[in-house]
Amino acid sequence: MSNIIRWEPVREMMTLREAMDRLFDDAFTRPLSLNNGNWSIPAVDMYQTDNEVVIKAALPGIKADEVQINVTGEILTLKGETKHEEEKTEKAYHLREQRWGAFERSIVLPTEVVADKAKADFENGVLTITLPKAEEVKPKSISIKTK
């Protein structure tokens, strides 16, 4: 014996709409990749603890003095540029994927931070930015008194 399933056209239309949204998202969003030999955007990880927000950006082959970090309100911006090495005519490249050119990445911070007390460390091509949270947004514990 077979079961009869009620046809609901609205449910199927929502599935079609979701498929179209996914199609347009995939087609028109820019991936994290090279764009005409230039940087698109550096890959970034961001997490927060009770006291700070930490951002780690992968910048291989970049020197610390080639990166500029700005915090304006709730937006952190990384900017920089690497110079393209001179072309040598005696070389015939078979593959060329080295990154060069300008890059910029703006990130919305998840909470208020104290930009004046920020720390930035650069080690092995990874830039780590530590931003202390503002006192107003830090979690506070309330002690309970018993009678």
Image (spheres, rainbow, N blue to C red):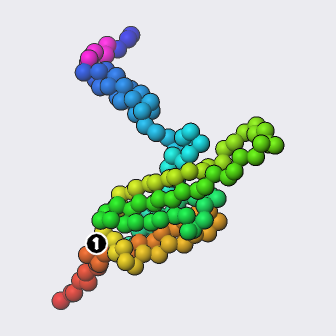
In the displayed structure, 143 sits above or below 5; it is below
Can you give x and y, in whole percent of width and height, for residue 96 in the image? 69, 42
Examine the structure image and report whether residue 20 is included in the region drawn in magenta: no
Q: Is 106 displayed left or right of 38 in the figure?
A: left
The residue indicated by pointer 1 is 137
**At x 41% / y 60%, what residue is drawn?**
77
Residue stretch rendered in magenta on the structure: 4-9
Q: Is 115 displayed left or right of 79 in the figure?
A: left
Given the current orientation, which residue lies at the most extreme right position? 90
Can you give x and y, in whole percent of width and height, for residue 93 in the image? 76, 39
In the displayed structure, 69 sits above or below 134; it is above
Please, what secondary structure does the residue beneath circle 1 have? helix
**At x 71% / y 46%, what residue is drawn?**
87
Residue 6 occupies quadrant: top left
Q: Is residue 111 visible?
A: no
Q: Residues within 10 Å of mark 1 (few under 14, many from 20)?
A: few
> Which quadrant, please, contains the C terminus?
bottom left
Viewer-side residue, 113 vs 22: 113
Q: Amino acid at mark 1?
A: Val
**At x 39% / y 57%, what residue is drawn?**
107
Given the current orientation, which residue lies at the most extreme bottom position? 147
Can you give x and y, in whole percent of width and height, for residue 82 in the image? 58, 56
